Amino acid sequence: MFVRRVGPWQIKIQVEPVLYSQAELTRTYEQVAGLWHTGLTWAGYQEAYRSAFEQLVQLGWFKHIASGERILDCGIGSGAFSQAFLRVLDRNLQLHGVDLSSQMLEQTEEKLTQSAHLSRQDAGHLAYPMASFGAVLSAHMLEHFEQPLSGIQEMVRVLRPGGVLVLSFTRRSPVSAAMSAFWRNRSFTSADMLDWLRQAGLSDRYVLSYALGSTRWVSLCVVGRKP
Ligand SMILES: C[S@@+](CC[C@H](N)C(=O)[O-])C[C@H]1O[C@@H](n2cnc3c(N)ncnc32)[C@H](O)[C@@H]1O
């Protein structure tokens, strides 16, 4: 952000990408779906997601999740985030995943090692009743939302009391600014995210840094609990 004081005034200029419309976004992800998982693995995200969930387990974030509970991954892509979660938790959980791109959902279907309920849905208007899930996960989807807070509020709506929201997101950095030329994705600071989690009514808010490779420069993770 450019900030300049001029006499009694403060001028702030923030450069934000022009977001893709939902149709453009879907088309873009349909085109890259076949290569998405390879790219993700190459960039170190499989390892980074696993390590983040291991740390969150150690910190006691998922003690409340009982065997048989339902969890939701919004913008599931090829399924890497929720797969890492399920592997680390090693409990018998029912996975639900939503995405705008049917090609991405096909990728998830191919890669999942367990059955899942996958559907083509806009995560901004989820077709689930309130308090349906013990955990809601989402990695790098809110970057495409005009109003990230309303996306978070929708995910919190379907979370049961005591449930946990886990978000992985693009952090604001020169690297993410360069990436947004193609993806037209937004990036956020941890302060933005913590404030949105607070406004969405979550308690025990926590930021986790990725420790591995390039992921540490590009992404961050936040968690919060629904009281
Ligand atoms: C950057 S990819 C991340 C995929 C996956 N979560 C991962 O970590 O690899 C963003 C995904 O969110 C999906 N997406 C974007 N906006 C969405 C929305 N409003 N509702 C559902 N899915 C959405 C895209 O189709 C894409 O698959």
Image (tube, helix red, strand yellow):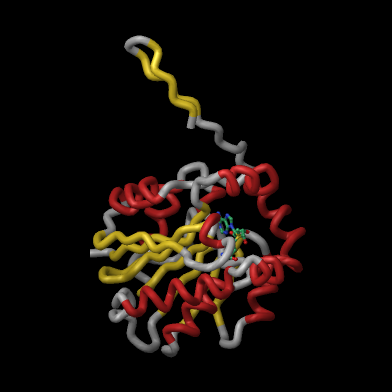
Q: For the point 37% across and 74% down, which residue is it?
A: 56
Q: For the point 66% across and 61% down, which residue is it?
A: 101
Out of 217 and 81, give the one closest to the viewer: 217
In the current view of this chain or complex, which residue is farthest to the top? 7
Q: Position of residue 54 (x, y in %)?
A: 42, 78
| Horizontal side of residue 220 vs 183, given as left or right | left
Query: In the rendered view, would you say 96 is above or below 152?
Result: below
Out of 95 and 176, give the one closest to the viewer: 176
- Which quarter of the figure is the C terminus placed in? bottom left
Splitting the image into 4 quarters, where does residue 140 fall?
Answer: bottom right
Splitting the image into 4 quarters, where does residue 108 fall?
Answer: bottom right
Count of numbered marks: 0
Q: Position of residue 91 (x, y in %)?
A: 42, 89
- Residue 97 visible here: yes
Q: Position of residue 143 (x, y in %)?
A: 53, 50
Query: In the rendered view, would you say 87 is above or below 151?
Result: below
Q: For the point 61% across and 37% down, which residue is it?
A: 18
- Residue 21 visible here: no
Query: In the rendered view, would you say 111 is above or below 39?
Result: below
Query: In the rendered view, would you say 204 is above or below 94?
Result: above
Q: For the point 69% across and 80% down, which residue is it?
A: 110
Q: Quadrant of ligand 1?
A: bottom right
| Horizontal side of residue 154 vs 25, given as left or right | left
Q: Position of residue 222 (x, y in %)?
A: 39, 60
Out of 66 and 38, give the one closest to the viewer: 38
